[in-house]
Image (spheres, rainbow, N blue to C red):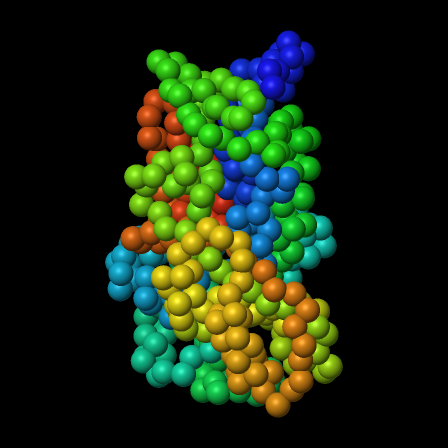
Amino acid sequence: MNPSIWELETFYRKRDIVIVGAGFTGLWTAISLKENSPERSVLVVDRSAIPIGASTRNAGFACFGSLTEVISDSGKMGWEKTLDLVQMRFDGLKKIQNYFDAEEIDFECCGGFEIINDEAPLQRIDEVNQKLQTITGLAATYSLNPRKLEEFGLGNSKFLVENPVEGSLHSGKLLQKLLEKCQNMGVEFLFGTEVLDLEEGESSVKIIAANFEIEAEKLVIATNAFTGNLLPEIDLVPARGQILLTEPVENLKLKGTFHYDEGFYYFRNLGNRVLLGGARNQDFKNEETDELVTTVFLQNHLENFLKTVILPNQDFKISNRWSGIMAMGKEKSPIITNISDQQIVAVRLSGMGVALAPKIGEMVAALV
């Protein structure tokens, strides 16, 4: 099918900047670009009807890192990179709260908690708090709270560490508000548009789709876990995160957002239901995929975690199951860089896209 002259001069005309990917990274980038240069034309293309990688398929956490995750990252990346990453996440969450009213995105500063069954991380809690004080402004970002361990009715849990400045939000509503803001700023969209190839010239880059081509002065690739399709050499591995949601639970005690096992498990209350996800460390190899399906093995494992830890001695039924695709790599720092004079890549958010994307958008706009 050949495009008409009307289509060529409107929808498929040359743009100043084209962003591939309409998830959190792509939308925050579009906003930052328009704030810096309102006169520039910005087009966002996405292969699906809605963004379906991780932005609308996550657990709705507004978090910046649990105690054991921060300790683990510091051991792998060093304290400087770890603190830079925590700072980005913390600042990103603040930016979300500054842009949108809490009720618009169901944001609730309900506190973040982590179940710990090993005393070793607790020996370092003062050290970590001291490191994070300049970021959060708190003398004790993390503190033991044994009272709430009993209050929440958790089983097989020795210690509960509380972080008072984390919370939850509605990922779908946040994405909708970002789309509205983009449209109000003049950002254009082409959904259902899969980019098949890229051709770079001396002063522009061409985006090639099935039935048309679009030229742009600058291209931003913000496809996160699916970036390997366009840039196979990039250091990025897709990582599926499986989730389940219970039906309403009578007299549910759980309140807040929770982590377990260095953040590999995550759960929260959604009203009087329990949302639980993760555990990919139980089946790493099979979860290194971009297939948006659930598996019997991990879903059964998550249900057992519900029975033994979250809802011991309580009946529950599962109402929904789904999965999202994150992007991991050799380390957790995102990749934000020029790969040519015309192309910029902003990917590998390591499961922290909600918090990182607002700041990544600013960094990409600065590169453009």
The percent position of residue 255, horizontal first and vertical second, equals: 63, 74
Image quarter of the N terminus: top right
At x 29%, y 53%, the residue is 330
Of residue 194 and residue 262, the one placed in the foreground of this image is 194
At x 39%, y 31%, the residue is 344
**Looking at the image, residue 319 lies above or below residue 291:** below
Is residue 179 rendered to the left or right of residue 64?
Answer: right
Of residue 2 and residue 315, the one placed in the foreground of this image is 2
Q: Residue furthest front?
A: 1
Q: Residue furthest top?
A: 5
The percent position of residue 260, horizontal first and vertical second, equals: 45, 73
Is residue 95 rendered to the left or right of residue 206?
Answer: right
At x 27%, y 57%, the residue is 77
Of residue 193 and residue 248, the one placed in the foreground of this image is 193
At x 63%, y 77%, the residue is 254
Toward which corner of the image does residue 139 lie, by quadrant?
A: bottom left
Toward which corner of the image does residue 288 lie, by quadrant?
A: bottom left
**Looking at the image, residue 192 lies above or below residue 274:** above
**Looking at the image, residue 73 lies above or below residue 143:** above
**Looking at the image, residue 147 lies above or below residue 214:** below
